[in-house]
Amino acid sequence: MYAKGAIIDDHVALVGSLNWNEHAGTENQEIVLELIGDDPTTYYNCVFAADW
């Protein structure tokens, strides 16, 4: 699976197919899932740290 995402303030994780540019946000069919809480953001922080 290939996904893009962002972690905001260690409390919100955004995960989806969106390329973070204006064209993708206005012209493409993209999906972004907002995950709120400590569990999802902790998970994605750990995945990012392991990949980095």
Image (tube, grey):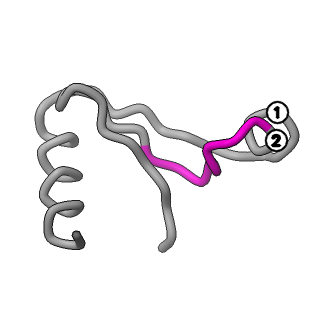
How crowded pointer 1 is (Cα within 10 Å; few <14, some 14-19, many 20+) is rated as: few
Q: Residues within 10 Å of mark 2 (few under 14, many from 20)?
A: few
Q: Is residue 20 above or below residue 51?
A: above
What amino acid is at disc 1? Thr
Which amino acid type is marked by label 2?
His
Q: Secondary structure at mark 1?
A: helix
Residue at image location 43% in from the left, 48% down from the top? 5
The disc label shown at residue 26, or none: 1
Q: Residue 15 bears which disc, if any?
A: none
> Image check: 52 left or right of 4?
left
Q: Position of residue 10 (x, y in %)?
A: 17, 31
> What residue is rendered at 79% in x and 46% in y?
29
Q: Is residue 37 above or below residue 43?
A: above
Observer-nearest of 4 and 21: 21
Q: Is residue 39 left or right of residue 6?
A: left
Image coordinates of residue 49 in percent, x first then y, are 15, 62
**Quarter occupied by residue 50:** bottom left
Which residue matches tag 2?
A: 23
Which region shows up in magenta?
15-22
Whole-percent x, y for residue 48 in the image: 23, 60
Task: Assess whether mark 1 and mark 2 are in contact (beta carbons under 8 angstroms).
Answer: yes
Residue visible at 48% across and 38% down in the picture: 33
- Magenta stretch, main secondary structure class: loop
